[in-house]
Image: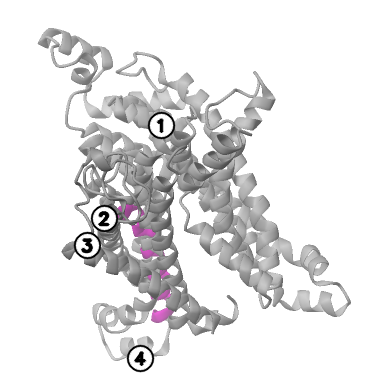
Amino acid sequence: MALALGRKVLVLVASVFVASLVVFAFLAVLPGDPAQVALGLNATPELLARTRAEFGLDRPLVTQYLDWMGGVLTGDFGTSYVTREAIGPQLLDRLGVTLWLVGAGMLVALLIAMPLGTIAAVRHRKPSGAAVSALSQLGVAVPAFLAGIILVQIFAVRLGWLPSGGWTPPVRDPVEWLRGLILPALSLGLVQGAVLTRYVRTAVLDVQSEDYIRTARSKGLRPYPALVRHGLRNAAVPVLTVLGLQLATLLVGAVVIERVFVLPGLGSMLLDAVAARDLLTVQGIVLVLVVAVLIVNFVVDALYTVLDPRLRRS
Amino acid sequence: MRRNVSLWAGIVLVGLVVGVALVSFAWTPHDPLLVDASVRLLGPGGEYVFGTDKLGRDLASQLMVGARTTLYVGVVAVGIAALIGTPLGVLAGMGANWLGELIMRTSDLVLAFPALLLAIMLGAVYGASTLTAMIAIGIATVPSFARIARAGTLQVVSTEYVLAARAGGRSRWWIAVRHVLPNISGIVVVQSSVSFAIAVLAEAALSFLGFGTAPPTPSWGRMLQESQELLAVEPRLALIPGAAIAIAVLGFNLLGDGLRDRFDPRLEVRR
């Protein structure tokens, strides 16, 4: 198993390296001059040249890449061409907001999908099971930002129970923080929960027809205890894979939700940076998001091997 | 039997979207782009079935032309993904081991660049447009096609008729065209339908963020974005395009589910 894991780590490192090259190359071929963008159209050639040297844009691309990556590895993402501020600390700050949002969204999704998916599977021949399936099918079709808009309309505008947007750091006011997190997390989690419900249902259905469940049932265990004691660990393997893939979707989905709820996360930082043509910042954020997705996929893959002994050999 | 319901419901919903889009070429109740301050924010009913927006544009007409945008983006994005992903998957399944490994690792890497992120990157470099959105969604969807095509190919090449063809001296190329492609076409069609649904959602999200279809071309996602400031007074402006998106996505998902059971009846028992 150690060998398999070691190989996966190598693949991860190689993927991160190639991804960083892609991100760098993508923005390096950009038409237009970052120095020009930073200084405006009226800049004199001397000033432009000086700024270019200051940003290090006059060096060969390979040097620029190595310098950038070297910095990134130590947490230094460089200085923004536009705001002239260090990118790293701000990025870290924003990442915190996004991770809270994604974590809470995932929690909502799991709290919806685990019970509903199990019910839909156990009662798949009854109307209640079919109703859950139909509901999840409908939930999958609703974009997260639309769910957000509707939730704001109901709980913020009409009922006035929760804020329609904004962010309070948890250390400053935990109650306000939680209140502000509920609607964004629900918008993100409801839709993902619907997607996940379908997978939980299929996984539980598969497990249900296994011999060991039949044996447990024949010993007199009721359907749910039999499932909980013998089936859920097996059903967890496929669900975990989907969960991993969904984490990646959630990270990106957060970009849109942050826009709807005016949250100062990584997504809104990215959109602002693109609007300001602040390319070094865009480069940094995209790299962080892509590496996050790669790491999530790696962890899922590794857990997979741990959870299901049959997969260890391959 | 129940799944046949999926197929038919999918056909009806997708047919509705396609029908509306086709009709919009020949006829819309009003000019979807006509700005008329005298009919701003009219409620539904009467001359304007779904009412008008803040500029006095007819919502129903915008919705009809928006269906065109949605389908256009979906067809091109899924087309890119299927035309690149399927051959790559077949190649990965039939070619040398190292080639298969290389293709699948590359495809894993592409998976780390979700459609939304790619579209924002492309938008940052080339300026956001329907084209950048389509290309981004297409590229991001290539790995799904490569994966299922590879899995299908591996299944087909282990069958006895392929062995027989090999023994008979047929080339790999001949086997790929004659046996593999026809046999995996079913799952590719299913994947296309499911990917179409994802593409519709992605296009809506991108237009919502301002990285998709540029004004004035009507797009469901942008209609939603424009509705946001008036949400408290006119929720209809968000709900109507929102419902249109949901219908399209639901339709393509159901169609995919239904087709899957058609092509692979073994699955029906489990689902």
Picture coordinates of residue B98 (x, y %)? 36, 61
Q: Which residue is mark 2?
A: B61
User: Which residue lies under the disc numbered 1?
Assistant: A285
According to the image, label 4 marks what residue? B164
* Residue highlighted by disc 3: B24
**Residues in magenta, as a range:** B137-157
- Spatial CA span between label 2 and label 4: 58 Å
For the residues labelled 3 and 4, the Cα–Cα distance comes to: 52 Å
Q: Quadrant of the N terminus of chain A?
A: bottom right
Alpha carbon separation for disc pair 1 and 4: 53 Å
Q: Secondary structure at mark 1?
A: helix
**Marks 1 and 2 in Cβ contact (< 8 Å):** no
On the same chain, marks 3 and 4? The answer is yes
Count of all numbered marks drawn on residues in the image: 4
The amino acid pointed to by label 1 is Ile
Q: Residues within 10 Å of mark 3 (few under 14, many from 20)?
A: many
Q: Nearer the viewer, mark 3 or mark 4?
A: 3
Query: Which secondary structure, mark 2?
Result: helix
Tag 2 and tag 4 share a subunit = yes
Kindly check if marks 3 and 2 are in contact, taking CB atoms under 8 A apart as contact: yes
B27 sits to left or right of B9: left
